[in-house]
C-alpha cells in the first residue's frame, strides 16, 4: 500500500480496517471476521480498498457489502495479487498487480503466521 500511495499524486486520506478469514492458518476458515473498523466516515467519498491478495473472494465480498452500506460515492478494489483458481465468489478487481497460481505466498506485506511481512520480495512455501 505504501508503494501505491506514493504513486498517487492527489490529495488523499488513509484509514485502516482489519478482517481475517485465515487467523494464523494457511487456509481460509471460510468465515470473515471484522477485527478493526474504519475511523473515518466514507459516505460520499471516493474509496479504494487496497487488498494484498484476493483468493476465495469471501473477504472482498464481505468488505464490499459492508462498505457499500456506508454509501461511498464510489468503491473500487485494488489488489496486489489474485488467485482466480481459488475463487468461490466472483468479485470485481479494478486494479490488479499480478495474477498467480494456487500457492501459499508471503513477503512484501503478506505474512506467514504473522512473520515475514518485511521481506522485500514475495516468495512461496514449498
Image (cartoon, grey):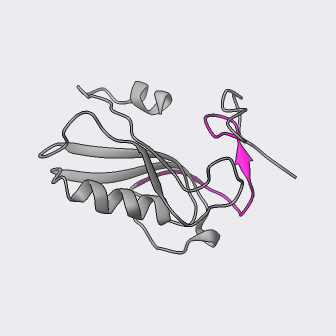
Number of numbered tags placed on the structure image: 0
The residue lying toward the viewer, choosing from 30 and 124, is 30
The residue lying toward the viewer, choosing from 93 and 58, is 58
- The verdict on residue 101 being magenta is yes
> Where in the figure is residue 15, as x and y percent of width and height?
33, 32
Q: Residue furthest right?
A: 126
Q: Name the image quarter holding residue 36.
A: top left
Q: Name the image quarter holding residue 38.
A: top left
- Look at the magenta stretch and give its main secondary structure: loop
Identify the residue at horizontal 63%, vertical 40% (top origin).
110
- The verdict on residue 71 being magenta is no
The residue lying toward the viewer, choosing from 50 and 23, is 23
Identify the residue at horizontal 56%, vertical 67% (top origin).
30
Q: Is residue 91 left or right of residue 125?
A: left
Q: Is residue 121 left or right of residue 58?
A: right
Q: Is residue 125 above or below residue 91?
A: above
Identify the residue at horizontal 74%, vertical 54% (top origin).
104
Magenta part of the chain: 95-112
The residue lying toward the viewer, choosing from 76 and 43, is 43
> Where in the figure is residue 11, as x and y percent of width and height?
23, 25
Identify the residue at horizontal 15%, vertical 54% (top origin).
71
> Where in the figure is residue 13, as x and y percent of width and height?
27, 28
Q: Is residue 25 left or right of residue 51?
A: right
> Where in the figure is residue 52, as x and y percent of width and height?
54, 45
Q: Is residue 39 above or below residue 73?
A: above
Q: Name the image quarter holding residue 106.
A: top right
Amino acid at each position: 500500500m505504501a508503494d501505491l500511495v506514493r504513486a498517487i499524486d492527489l490529495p488523499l486520506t488513509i484509514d485502516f480496517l482489519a478482517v481475517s478469514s485465515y487467523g494464523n492458518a494457511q487456509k481460509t476458515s471460510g468465515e470473515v471476521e471484522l477485527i478493526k473498523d474504519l475511523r473515518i466516515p466514507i459516505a460520499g467519498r471516493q474509496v479504494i480498498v487496497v487488498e494484498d491478495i484476493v483468493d476465495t473472494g469471501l473477504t472482498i465480498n464481505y468488505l464490499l457489502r459492508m462498505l457499500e452500506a456506508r454509501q461511498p460515492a464510489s468503491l473500487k478494489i485494488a489488489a496486489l495479487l489474485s488467485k482466480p483458481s481459488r475463487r468461490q465468489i466472483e468479485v470485481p478487481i479494478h486494479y490488479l498487480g499480478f495474477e498467480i497460481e494456487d500457492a501459499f505466498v508471503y513477503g512484501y506485506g503478506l505474512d506467514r503466521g504473522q512473520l515475514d511481512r518485511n521481506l522485500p520480495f514475495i516468495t512461496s512455501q514449498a
